[in-house]
Image (cartoon, helix red, strand yellow):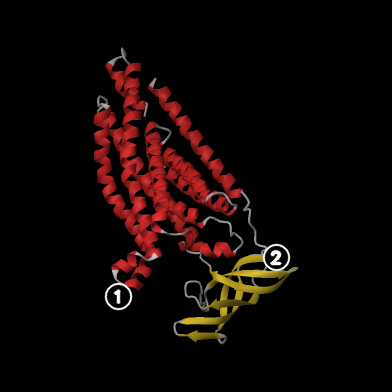
Amino acid sequence: MFDRIVKVLSQRNTILILFITALSVILLRMPSPYTSPYAQSVERTRARVTAVDDSLIQQFGIVKAGSQTLRVEILQGPYQGQEVEAVNDLIGKMETDKMFRVGDIAFVVLDLEGDAIHRATAYDHYRLDTEVMLFALFAALLIVFAGWSGVRALLSFVFAVLLMWKILLPGILLGYDPLLVALCVVAVLAAATLFLVAGVTRTALTAYLGALLGVLLTMGLAIALMPRFNLHGAILPFSETLLYSGFDKLNLTHLFLAAVFIGASGAVIDVAIDVAASMNEVIQKRPDLSFREMLASGFAVGRAMTSTMVTTLLTAYAAGYMALMMIFIAQGVPPVNILNTNYVAAEVMKTLVGSFGLVTVAPFTALVGSVILTRSKRRAAAQVAGAPAAAIAPSAAAQE
């Protein structure tokens, strides 16, 4: 009996892994609904900067404007080995402008006319090799440390990236309600993450339901508080640019609200699985616990976890607007003025509403876990009633 249950659970986990892998491949190969009209005859490549001409650059204090002329050697593709002149246009914004030096590796866009290069633009420094190396190192460390669980965690990470890149962002741009799209994506992402990492078990189900309740509460609270804060979605960086790019019907307010609970969803999922796993461990050691006792145990575990996770959420959000806060402090702006500024108020809302989700996900998970886990134990005990005492413990444990 025990071997059969383990085999069934193993098969379900294998099927889930194959299913998520197949979905990831489909998402990766899914074409984007948006293509640039200027990208029909271009070649993107790496190039080494061999010469630099800064004579057309003008200096205005710490800001530079004008054009930097480069001589670059193409390092890959059909034009490998050729040297061409490339342009690096500066618009006077330090956050977007870049300067090249001899020896730098640039990411160059070649505009073609037939088979000839018509113009070369130094888009930015080439960073793909470093990014791939870091991801490979991260994946290797994860697998070495966590083994097979690390492989499943890596799969959930890749699936999350593809889900946001191929479904969340294009879906919002296509005109669907950002709140609805974001909620569906978070629900699927939470399910994939929890069931991949924890397996197709009641523990994962407990964590999923608890996390979903926490996310729903976060979303509802954000919707309810938005009018009180008198905010609009244009405070999101680059959101106004979307309106000028042909997406004038985009609901920026709903986009901001979606960002609120998406930002908190990762921490919510983390707390939910920690509480559910701890409760499952308790019920394995003490299968005689009642619903009330299990609920009390879940609350005790949740209190310790939420105390630290709230601070984690605060530091994660605070890092995003450090420079803005430094500007206010350097100018001697009173705290009451700072807290009433729309940018700061938006971050306060994100932090506090996300914290509500974190605080409530633990009791939600404890409540769901008390129902699911204690009921499963009672059912297991009833099924093995009359069996030899030695067979009861492993059969009950296998249900999880």
Q: Residue sitting at 34 percent across and 68 percent down?
A: 325
Q: Locate residue 130, reporting x and y percent.
A: 48, 63
Q: Secondary structure at mark 2?
A: loop
Q: Is residue 156 left or right of 34 when viewed as pictured?
A: left
- The circle drawn on residue 288 is none
Q: CA distance from mark 2 to mark 1?
A: 53 Å
> Dot 1, crowdedness within 10 Å: few (<14), some or many (≥20)?
few
Q: Quadrant of residue 295?
A: top left
Identity of the residue furthest to the right in this view: 114
Which sits earlier in the primary sequence, circle 2 or circle 1? 2
Q: Quadrant of residue 79?
A: bottom right
Q: Is residue 47 visible?
A: yes
Q: Secondary structure at mark 1?
A: loop
Q: Locate residue 85, reporting x and y percent.
A: 63, 78
Q: Is residue 169 left or right of 204 when viewed as pictured?
A: right
351 or 71: nearer the eye?
351
Q: How many marks?
A: 2
Q: Locate residue 8, reporting x and y percent.
A: 45, 26
Q: Amino acid at mark 2?
A: Ser
Q: Which residue is mark 2?
A: 41
Q: Which residue is mark 1?
A: 332
Q: Residue sitting at 54 percent across and 49 percent down?
A: 177
Q: Amino acid at mark 1?
A: Gly
Rendered position, 10 above or below 154? above
Q: Is residue 146 visible?
A: no
Image quadrant holding the N terminus, namely top left
Image quadrant holding the C terminus, namely top left
Identity of the residue furthest to the bottom in this view: 55
Q: Residue sitting at 46 percent across and 54 percent down?
A: 136
